[in-house]
Image (spheres, rainbow, N blue to C red):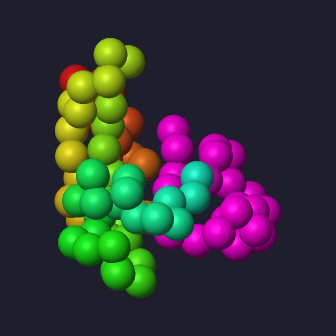
Amino acid sequence: MLGISFDTQEDNAAFAEKFDFGYPLLCDTDHKIGLAYEACDSLEAEYPRRISYLIAPDGRIEQAYPKVNPAEHPAQVLADLET
């Protein structure tokens, strides 16, 4: 599991520490990943959309989650992994 945001490395490190993230939080300060995965529509976007992808070990996208509710999303992904 990875998280990605448009924030700097320093901002991401502080955020991950504050919320005790158990996974890496990567930086996409140039928005290239956001554009590639449709989390934003332009290089000028201030924030990415909260979306998620379930990616298979071979790199294929198994499931796309275009709107993510952080409180419910882990259970949804776990259920999808069981199918």
**Where is residue 4 shown, x and y percent of the image?**
50, 56
- Residue 30 lies left or right of residue 21; in this view the side is left
Image quadrant in which you'd find residue 8: bottom right
Image quadrant in which you'd find residue 55: top left
**Where is residue 39 shown, x and y percent of the image?**
29, 64
- Residue 72 lies left or right of residue 22; in this view the side is left
- Residue 69 lies left or right of residue 22; in this view the side is left
Q: Which residues are magenta?
A: 1-25
**Where is residue 1 shown, x and y percent of the image?**
51, 39
Q: Is residue 55 above or below residue 13?
A: above
Say which of 48 and 16 sits in front: 48
Say which of 6 and 24 sits in front: 6
Residue 73 visible from this viewpoint = no
- Residue 24 shown in magenta: yes
Q: Residue at x 32, y 16 (%)?
A: 58
Say which of 43 and 27 sits in front: 43
